[in-house]
Amino acid sequence: MALRNQIAEKVATFPDPHLGINLRESEEHLVDGEARLMQNCFRNGGVRIRRGSSNLNTVSLGAFRILGGHKYYYGGVSPAGKRLIAYSNKISVLSDAASETNLTTGMTTGLITHFTTWSITDSVYISNGTDTLRKYDGTTFSTVSGTAIPSPRARVAVYLDRLFAITANGIEHTNPRSDSVWSTNSSWCTYRPQTPGLFTAIAPVSWKGTDTIYPGLLAFQERSTYLITGADFGSDVTSATATTGYDGGIDLIDPTVGTASPRSVCSVPGVGTFWFTADRNVYWMKEGAFVGQFIGDKLQSTGTTAGIESANLAALDAVWMEYYDNILILAIPIGSATYASTQFWLDIRSLRDHPEYGPVWYGPMTGQTIGNAWVENQQGNSVLYGGEGNASTAAFIYSMRVASVFTDAVGTADNDIVMAYQTAFKSFGTPSREKYVQAVHLDCNGFAGTATLDMLDLDGTLASGVNITAS
């Protein structure tokens, strides 16, 4: 028997936030399935606190930030792997036991550093925008020598049988299967932008035809995106004219969308390529298509929680994205921060399985100070690592999203993760009627700490900091 004037349970129930957060809409326009805030939590069979991190090296490597990291897998029939990190003027190998082997102290100090493994030479290439291209083959660290060796402005890219790199002249590339002969300001094989400004990033991409997979490179300026394609880029890139068979080319595919955040360009298998735009949004180019869409609108805050609109315009090169375990992590410097101080997580499983939901974001994820991250996922590895971005904390490497860890390592400290979940405003089916809420029933799991409840309506706070006890 129903009580008189009792609101039906199906109307009163708060559904799981299967649509993620929406920081942009007004309170009364949030819909069932949206949340106003999912700080340090995400939906996975229910709302759960995110997992924390632990430090790999318990003693700092010095009063520096980590400038880059990469797991270099190599060795052919005798496979091996080495974790490379960059900080200060150094490139080092850091083992799982946090033992450091220094490879060089000859890099220009303090520059964001990129790594690219090339299977043809079984080597990893290191670039930082200033120094001549470096190379490591698992034994010897060296400066690449030969003809017109560049000082790449961003990560070098592998395309078919050659390397490509951004320089002040444009995008240069090598002879086939060679790292020692590069084009330089060529009239036919140096690729130049159509709009003013330098290239900022390049990244491999592919699309599928009926019976063929077609490779290419996406190239970016701050406000433009290009596609480089071809099967034959010339037998001799030092030639004054194009060599026989040359069919390479560059096309402007969008004159309004680009990136100033080279580390934000991230490809997700079967889904497409994502990047953070210079006007502080997130762009998604679906796999097999070269027409993209903005998917960051719900992260543009109109309330007290800072969203991507608060990203530091002077530090957009500190933005990074990384895909790991069905989550695409977007990390941005908020306010005056010069390192990525806040993360938002895109649910890739939802994007793939429920496209009708649109992009489902969780966050903000706070408490970590990760300046860059990389996935180690070969030879039995499946780990996400990050490097400390705040030089005042000092140089530490962290294992991220660690099972059963609910604290964040920041230097030598282990800080509790503070979770805050704020539901959508609930009208209970009758927006204009005043309600008297007699009871609220919650189903939740707790690991440690104290859970509290706030109740708010459109006029403000009704209750705040009420302790939740088991019953």
Image: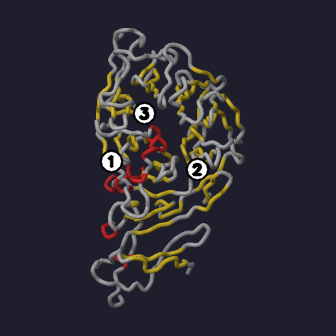
Element carrying mark 3: strand
Task: Name the residue located 27 percent from the left edge and 80 percent from the top edge.
Answer: 432
Task: Name the residue located 41 percent from the left edge and 69 percent from the top edge.
Answer: 423
Q: Given contact means CB atoms under 8 Å apart, are the residues at marks 2 and 1 in contact?
A: no
Task: Name the residue located 59 percent from the left edge and 72 percent from the top edge.
Answer: 450
Residue that carries the numbered disc 1 in the rendered image: 294
Element carrying mark 1: strand
Residue 375 picture location, percent across and down = 54, 41
Inspect this view and state whether residue 244 appears: yes
Task: Name the residue located 34 percent from the left edge and 41 percent from the top edge.
Answer: 285
Give the number of the mark in front: 2 or 1.
1
Specify the amino acid type for callout 3.
Ala
Nearer-N-terminus badge (1/3): 3
- Quarter of the picture holding the N terminus: bottom left
Inspect this view and state whether residue 10 appears: no
Q: Given contact means CB atoms under 8 Å apart, are the residues at marks 2 and 3 in contact?
A: no
Residue that carries the numbered disc 2 in the rendered image: 400
Left or right? Give the position of 319 relative to 394: left
Residue 456 picture location, percent across and down = 41, 76
The Cα–Cα distance between marks 2 and 3, rounded to whole angstroms, is 26 Å
Q: Is residue 308 above or below residue 117?
A: below
Element carrying mark 2: strand
Q: Quadrant of residue 206?
A: top left
The Cα–Cα distance between marks 2 and 1, rounded to whole angstroms, is 28 Å
Label ID, residue 201: 3
Residue 282 picture location, percent across and down = 37, 47
Q: Given contact means CB atoms under 8 Å apart, are the residues at marks 1 and 3 in contact?
A: no
Q: Nearer the viewer, residue 120 or 208?
A: 120
Specify the amino acid type for callout 2.
Met
Nearer-N-terminus badge (2/1): 1
Left or right? Give the position of 396 relative to 334: right
